[in-house]
Image (cartoon, grey):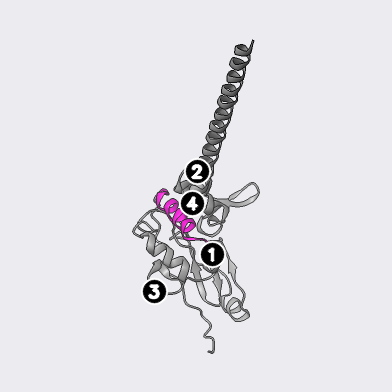
């Protein structure tokens, strides 16, 4: 009887130890799985690739509002998906408005959402596609410099980016976000469209 009791005690001790180890292993596995998920979700903003993250940022940020030409749909103007992010069409004439009145009164107006008139003159939304007439020849450092400093083509000696380009807000993206945006733009369908240069104001303002 005594021998049987000892055997039962040994069995109980071994069982307890075995169950304890199993529990620790499962907890460790769950912890590792959780860590893996967390690490994966932090990379690329939780998207499957840097390009997909950049696409999300571009679309959610409304970049196409100004950089994609419009066509008339059943509910009014809508993005022309065949010209996605290609900027103001080269052959489209300048807005037919009273520039003197717009500039003198400090107003700004858009005819197509790709051309804008204001005290700075006329500005046209840039081609952001991967074509050489867009950002095809840009490198990542240029893009970051352009957004951080509001400089055309990301070159220190170039002119300032003109309204209504909201670079002062976009510059608040962190480096990883801007790099994702650039990665997406470089992946877009190249559309050849040489956007016209901006026009100076007709009203000479006193400094």
In the rendering, at what x and y percent does residue 23 appear? 58, 30
Q: Residue at x 52, y 67 (%)?
A: 167
In the rendering, at what x and y percent does residue 176 appear? 47, 56
Under circle 3, the secondary element is loop
Q: Which residue is mark 4?
A: 54
Residue at the farthest bottom position: 206
Q: Residues within 10 Å of mark 2 (few under 14, many from 20)?
A: some
Magenta residues span: 172-189
In the rendering, at what x and y percent does residue 173 appear? 52, 61
Please name which of the two marks, 4 or 3, marks the residue nearer to the observer: 4
Q: Decide if residue 196 is in sight here.
A: no
Q: How far apart in space, not on screen, are marks 2 and 4 (Cα)?
A: 16 Å
Q: Earlier in the sequence, mark 3 or mark 1?
A: 3
Q: Earlier in the sequence, mark 4 or mark 3?
A: 4
Q: Earlier in the sequence, mark 1 or mark 4?
A: 4
Disc number placed over residue 158 in the picture, else none: 3
Q: Which residue is mark 2?
A: 40
In the rendering, at what x and y percent does residue 29 appear? 53, 34
Under circle 4, the secondary element is helix
Please tell me whether residue 152 is drawn above or below residue 22 in the rendered image.
Answer: below
Q: Which residue is mark 1?
A: 172
Q: Decide if residue 202 is in sight here.
A: yes
């Amino acid at each position: 009887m005594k021998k049987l009791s000892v055997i039962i005690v040994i069995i109980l001790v071994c069982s307890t130890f075995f169950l304890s180890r199993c529990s620790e292993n499962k907890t460790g596995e769950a912890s590792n799985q959780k860590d893996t998920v967390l690490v994966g979700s932090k990379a690329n903003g939780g998207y499957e690739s840097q390009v997909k993250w950049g696409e999300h940022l571009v679309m959610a940020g409304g970049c196409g509002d100004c950089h994609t030409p419009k066509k008339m749909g059943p509910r009014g103007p809508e993005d022309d998906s065949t010209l996605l992010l290609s900027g103001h069409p080269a052959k489209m004439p300048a807005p037919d408005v009273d520039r003197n009145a717009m500039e003198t009164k400090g107003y700004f107006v858009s005819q197509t959402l790709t051309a804008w008139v204001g005290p700075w003159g006329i500005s046209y939304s840039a081609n952001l596609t991967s074509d050489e007439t867009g950002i095809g020849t840009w490198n990542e450092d240029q893009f970051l410099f352009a957004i951080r400093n509001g400089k055309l083509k990301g070159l220190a000696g170039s002119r300032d980016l003109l309204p209504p380009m909201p670079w002062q807000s976009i510059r608040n993206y962190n480096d990883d976000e801007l790099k994702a945006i650039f990665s997406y733009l470089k992946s877009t369908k190249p559309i050849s469209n040489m956007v016209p240069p901006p026009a100076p104001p007709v009203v000479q303002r006193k400094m």
